Image (cartoon, helix red, strand yellow):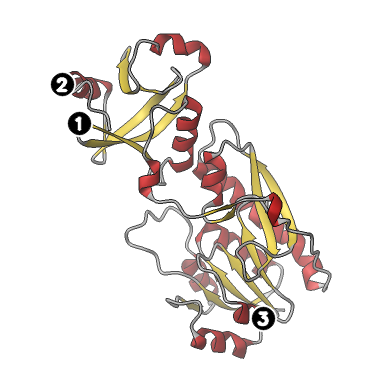
Amino acid sequence: MRAVVFAYHSVGVRCLKVLLARGIEVALVVTHEDNPNETIWFDSVAALCAEHGIATITPADANAPELQAQIAALAPDFIFSFYYRNMLPVALLALAKHGAYNLHGSLLPKYRGRVPVNWAVLHGETETGATLHEMAAKPDAGAIVAQTAVPILPDDTAFEVFGKLTVAAEQTLWYALPLMLAGQTPRLPNELAKGSYFGGRKPEDGRIDWTQPAQTVYNLHRAVAPPYPGAWTVLDGKTYIIVKARLLSKDAAQSTINLPTGLAVSDNRILGVCGDGRALRIEALSADGKPVTPAELQQTLTASPARHG
């Protein structure tokens, strides 16, 4: 069996390795050039392809007629998309004799669309997973082939969940491929009306509203904690980013009851006091790319006690 693969990120690397391990000929990999403005914390599809001698291209437009012609000439049995960031046109999908399939980072039909892991953590989900599904004209809307669930623990960051998801993606594809290669691909309903769709997130979406409950603020921190851009707040015109934090227990709320909302220092600890009186214990805080100590923050708070933004 021959496949053309659209792939990027660690999920792309692991799933490509699964295809090779299952004996599938990967005739071409379409990937992205790394964005110099993006923190590249994930594995490189291009490096894997170079190691295995697999032809790789990085077209600017997945809808380009010349790309479609190139793939048509390869006559692929399958087309796969593993964390490739662009939608593929229906005419291109139709070139695969045995179907075109995408690996999505949620338990469809929940969290269709962009950055599903971050959205799941933001919304306080306790479970997510990986779904292999047929590609269709709408994003993440085709029939489901297989799914693997993973837990989201109370203190997991999106980065930690993504590590679990990468393993789940590998497992999902590994166990689904024998049936697919035998022409017995499962097709389970993807009931979109029971799910949800979300768009992409930008760094500015990480701004903290300290009037919200502490659990909501903590979920935001977990969803965008480094290597993502981080949850942030402005104090005296300077932007502070939460690097690492934990949610204080409800019993500890009594110790923060007299503190104003926002960044605070108490007993040489940096806190983020929220609208419900509970707080985050901020174990690492940065500004201008440098760590901020409790003493430094206290000095700023003393000079400008009411200038949170």
Residue 269 visible in image: no
Q: Residue at x 18, y 21 (%)?
A: 299
Task: Quote the CA–CA distance across marks 2 and 1.
Answer: 9 Å
Q: Which residue is mark 1?
A: 236
The residues tagged by marks 3 and 2 sit, at their Cα atoms, a distance apart of: 64 Å
Tag 3, which secondary structure?
A: loop
Tell me: 282 left or right of 79: left
Above/below status of 229 relative to 278:
below
In the rendered view, tell whether residue 163 sits above or below residue 263. Answer: below
User: Of all residues shown, which one is farthest toward the left?
Assistant: 303
Q: Which mark is residue 187?
A: none
Using the rendered view, name the quadrant where residue 190 is placed: bottom right
Residue 213: x and y in percent read 47, 26
**265 left or right of 224 in image:** left
Residue 125 percent coordinates (x, y): 61, 38
**Which residue corresponds to mark 2?**
303
Residue at the image point whose x is 52% and y is 56% from the top: 114
Q: Depth check: give the residue in front, 96 or 18.
A: 96
When the figure is inspected, residue 185 is found, relative to residue 214, above or below; the finding is below
Tell me the kind of residue under disc 1.
Asp
Do the CB atoms of the residues marked 2 and 1 lie less than 8 Å apart? yes
Q: Which residue is mark 3?
A: 94
Amino acid type indicated by mark 3: Ala
| Residue 33 position within the rendered picture, expressed as x and y whole percent measured from the top left | 41, 69
| Quarter containing the C terminus | top left
Q: Secondary structure at mark 1?
A: loop
Could you tell me which secondary element the residue under label 2 belongs to? helix
- Report whether residue 121 is seen: yes
